[in-house]
Amino acid sequence: MASHIKCPNCGLYNTNKEYCTNCNTLLSYKKRRELANKKAEKERRERERIQKEASPSFYNKYKDHRYLIVRVFVRVFHSIWMGFIAIGMFIAWVFSAIAA
């Protein structure tokens, strides 16, 4: 079955084409969606890359500091923080086990 699509740019009717034969405008809605999704995914990855480069975590920023006292403080602080996280996870697990 032939598909007649009117070009939104020049008004020419095209049969079974993804691009207009007159002005080379994209006609296929499926292809437009694919291109838009690829572009959005590429932009999302670029934003994530920039965000990771622009804002390192406190630990990653200071773990290799040139002063020993700063490195020690950061590692001790990080260890204490991981301990609190582990205790919190254990408490959450106990409550969920009791509730179930």
Image (cartoon, rainbow, N blue to C red):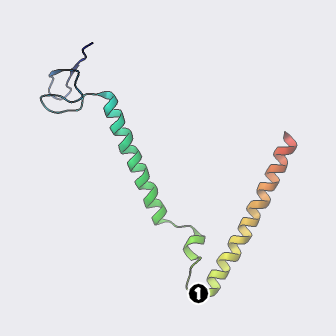
Q: Is residue 38 above or below residue 85?
A: above
Task: Please identify the residue farthest to the left as the structure is shown.
Answer: 22
The amino acid at mark 1 is Tyr
Residue 62 percent coordinates (x, y) = 57, 76
> At x 77% / y 57%, what residue is drawn?
88
Q: Is residue 77 left or right of residue 25?
A: right
> At x 38% / y 49%, what residue is drawn?
42
State the quadrant of the C terminus: top right
> At x 39% / y 44%, what residue is drawn?
40
Q: Quadrant of residue 47?
A: bottom left
Q: Secondary structure at mark 1?
A: loop
> At x 28% / y 28%, what residue is drawn?
28
Q: Is residue 83 above or below residue 94?
A: below
Task: Please identify the residue farthest to the right as the structure is shown.
Answer: 98
Q: Is residue 23 left or right of residue 59?
A: left
Residue 45 percent coordinates (x, y) = 43, 52
Q: Is residue 99 left or right of residue 13?
A: right
Task: Please identify the residue farthest to the top as the structure is shown.
Answer: 1
Task: Please identify the residue farthest to the front as the structure is shown.
Answer: 1
- The number of discs equals 1
Q: Which residue occupies the foreground of this view, 10 or 2?
A: 2
Q: Residues within 10 Å of mark 1 (few under 14, many from 20)?
A: few
Q: Is residue 55 above or below residue 64?
A: above
Q: Which residue is mark 1?
A: 67
Q: Quadrant of residue 4?
A: top left
Residue 53 percent coordinates (x, y) = 46, 65
State the quadrant of the N terminus: top left
